[in-house]
Amino acid sequence: MEPWVILAGYAFSLMKFQSYDSQRGQAGLGEEKMEHREQSFTSSAAKQLALYAFYTMVALAVIMYMLSIAAGRTGSTASGVAVDPDNNSITIALRQEPPQLDHVRATDSSSIIVLSHSMEGLIAYNDAGSLIPGMAERWEIREDGATFWIREEARWSDGVPVTAHDFVFSWRRAVDPATAAEYSFILYPIVNAEEINQGNLPPQTLGVRAVNDRVLEVDFNQPTPYFDKLVAFITYFPTREDFFNNTEGRYGADADMMLANGPYIVTEWTHSASMTWEKNPYYWNDEKGFLDTINVGYITEDVNAKLNLFKDGQISDTHLVAPMLGSAMEQRWQIDRSMDGTVFFLQLNFREDRITANKNFRKALQYAQDPVEFVYKALKEPSYLPAVSLFPYWIRGVDDSFRKEYPPPEHEFNVAKAREHLELARQELGIEEFPPLVILADDSPIGSISSEYYQATFTKNLGLEIRIDKQIFKQRLAKMTAGDFDIVVSGWGPDYDDALTFGDLFASWNLNNRGRYASEAMDEQIRIAQSELDPLRRMEAFAEIQRIVHEDVVMIPMYERGWSFVVDPRLKGFKRRAVGPEVDYNFAYIETGEE
Amino acid sequence: MTDIHVSDFRPLQRRSDVHGISRPSLSYWEDAWIRLKANKRAIVSLYLVVALLFFTLLGPLIWTVDPGLQDLDQISQPPGTDRSAEIVADYIAWDGVDPSAGSGARVIDVPTTQVVRLKWDSLPGANGHRVYRNLFPVGNEFAYGIPVGEYFDNAIDFHEDRLDLKPGRYFYSIVALAADGSVTQTYQTVEVDVVRVTTLSEAREQGLIQTDSDLQIGDSINLSAHPLGTDYLGRDMLSRLMAGAQVSLSIGIGAPLFFVFFGVVFGSVAGFIGGKVDQFMMRFADFVVALPFLLFMILFKIAFGIGPGESGIMPMLIALVLLMWPATARLVRGQILQIREQAYVQASQLLGAKTNYLIFRHMLPNTLGVVLVTLTFEIPKAIFVEAFLSFIGMGVAPPTPSWGSMSNEGIKTMLTTPHELIFPAVFISITVLAFNLLGDGLRDALDARMRNQE
């Protein structure tokens, strides 16, 4: 039985014991006397009970106080302080334990964070988020392929030079069906990559070769103007063959099963508890990696726990959620904000048996809701922006931001129009009443608010019956893939810094297009966006995609996620990124008072 | 010696008042009621239970607010908040034009809970501006508050804040951004007193005014009343608690009624027949005890084809009825076994009483006390189970509330708006306590062995 039942049972048994006593006390007494006796007994028993309760409370308070002192002591000795200028080290918290740290198979944000500190691709990001040379000192991207010249001082953390062969080995492994890398599709611009991944060709036929140790040649299927942005992604990082073979299939499973070529080395990894990253002495770039040690002292998803750790000076930074902002203002912290890069939207199911496959019905849904009200009134997160398009506001266009160059079609919140479209849909479908719709959502606080808000909105404005299906993240993905939904609250985050990372989401061949949207016009524009070399025509294709998404109601935008966060004022150069690692300590340094 | 007269040996005259009874005869129930009345705890609990039934059954007739209606003007409002509001026009987007052509950081129009419009002149050396909102003055720490807007572009010199505005004082700061986008210490602050407003269309939607009302923009009206405040989506707590009570109590009282009845039948049959049948039946009861409740609840949910977003109340009820009866059955069987051997039953049998008469006259009435007590103890248990399952999301489907699911929602904002957790939690606690104390009092009152102690 659950502990609370036992506790409650215990409390009641105490009371019962008391009442037995009171009964026994009555035996053999005159009525009046007995009544008096009972009253005095009850009151004294109550006093006794109150006293016990008081003692218990006091004892509990003392124990809790002692425990908090003890916890504080062990905490500070075990993991050090948030920012330690003497040892030039900081302590941070990760949200989740990385499942493993093989960059080819990694998909989750925690793994991306760790790998972005311990490894570096041919091209890297600078502190402002623009592309800079990484392992490659220069490169050339042509219509039919690309060449990368690897820098001489590029070294692995054991001192061995990084060569073009390491990239060839890594990329072959990424498309090898035996590796089963989820991100293998990101290499598809390379000749034969898709064929190899489907098992039709051997990995050796991949269109990449090492001309010599320092020159890497890549052949493209079709022109890929954004290839420089792709190679900054973790799947394109190098793997050294002899080291990989020595790990006997455990590559990336432990600290000693990894080889670094980035600013930091993962030197210790106590699974589910902590990690230590130390400065890589062989790393070439002296504009990255200023700290000697980064301790990942905590791995927790609990934002409240992280807030307390930050308050106690145990971790250097944490993000805040809306209910915490009041107390953060009281603490007089300097609150910062950043965009997370992810756009959230209601994805609709286009499979034929679904009501949402009807365009007028989708139009009705679109007109019946207002993301502005949702973000400002229901979510109340100051760093979130009401979404207006598939492309978030930070996506770059030709010269300026994409949003400025190609403003998205304006959304109109209009219940009357929504009802007209609903009526049209009813006639087209030839039904009297709409069957209940299922909104699939994550089992998280935001997921609950989102699904319940849209449930009430669609019920109020359209009179639809909406059912909510809350699932844990993995189960939601599984149900999305199976098409087991009408509407799903989902998000899409960028893999690389190019509009295409969002633009090809609704391609008929994209497996992440889980609503199975398929249209000729959309596919055509995506093909242009994938292979067009002229930036202007490419951006026009994205603008057309943006228009189709709105016009055809492929999805209903909800919000662009952001973060409100606080950082220890002594730590400078810390970044939260939209593309790349969510938190970036590569450029972080401790500001000492003397300077 | 006195003379003995023959008349002294006459029988006395028959008198009818010889066996006169000074007090009226008390039936079992009358006696129990008297003793229950003497137990203050039990009586208070009884009142509480009755009040709770009124709250559940009659409450929604009096307080007719829809528990699913979202009042987005009053989100997470604690009880007793001032609710007078001014009526303003519907929101129209602003293009950043300042009709008064003022200078410095300033507020355009009247700042309201609908929108606060800020305009500023570009700060010296700025590469863009960030707009912060604070509840406190900025002070020496440069604690600007929460960033509500960011423009990395000097051409934009206005911001509309519509984020969760509450009536009261805010300190807005316009902060200059450095070339790399970081925050500098150059800023201007403007103090803003926000007034609560609503729009005509919103007021109509909430049913605050009639469609033909002649209320004008600028008039003052009271927003809809929420005696116990609202939850995180602006839904009325009182009506949600009532709706939640219907779910919680229907499970809490319905399920025990069924399974206690079944337990009584099962237990009395086993106890009365005895022997091998009894052995067999009680081992079956043991087997049922060993079945895990949660697993069965999930299995029933699947077996019944309860899809996502549909209420899980039916499978919960069935799982409760099918799995929780053995406790009652054992208790009743024990009682029956005991009563069967009592002298008065044997006497009755010798006098030729039939089985039916024995069961209905002697057995069942004598177990009724035990049964009633079990029932009152099973009710809080069932309420707890319902609350627990709804808390973990296995029970009711949103937007239907139950006390458990309301607690689950309230716990997320426990520190900022505690009323969202406290009310459902208090209702669960009071209900469970009342039923337990009542059960306690009933057990004492119905115990026949204590009958003559007074």
Image (spheres, coloured by chain):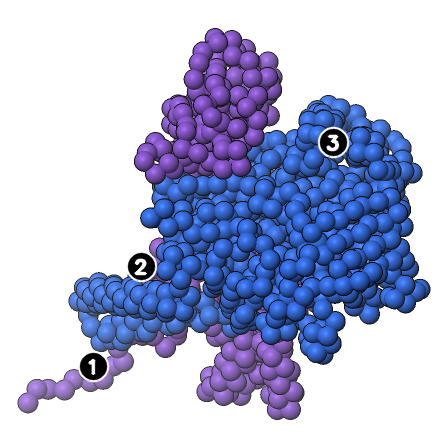
What residue would you read off at disc 3? A398
Whole-Å distance between the Cαs marked 1 and 2?
A: 60 Å
Helix, strand or loop at label 1? It is helix
Name the residue rendered at 77%, 44% in the picture.
A226
Between circles 2 and 3, the one closer to the viewer is 3
Helix, strand or loop at label 3? It is loop
Let me know if residue B13 appears in the view.
no
Res A164 quadrant in image: bottom right
Between circles 1 and 2, the one closer to the viewer is 2
Name the residue rendered at 48%, 57% in the picture.
A291
Q: Amino acid at mark 2?
A: Lys
User: Residue B33's spot in the image, x, y percent?
Assistant: 38, 62
Relative to A45, residue A414 above or below: above
Whole-Å distance between the Cαs marked 2 and 3?
A: 81 Å
Local packing at callout 2 (Cα closer than 10 Å; few below 14, some 14-19, many 20+) is few
Let me know if residue A528 appears in the view.
yes
Local packing at callout 1 (Cα closer than 10 Å; few below 14, some 14-19, many 20+) is few
Relative to B122, residue A6 above or below: below
Name the residue rendered at 85%, 49% in the picture.
A145
Res A251 quadrant in image: bottom right
The picture's colour for chain B is: purple
User: Residue A170's spot in the image, x, y percent?
Assistant: 76, 64
Helix, strand or loop at label 2? It is helix
Relative to A169, residue A333 above or below: above
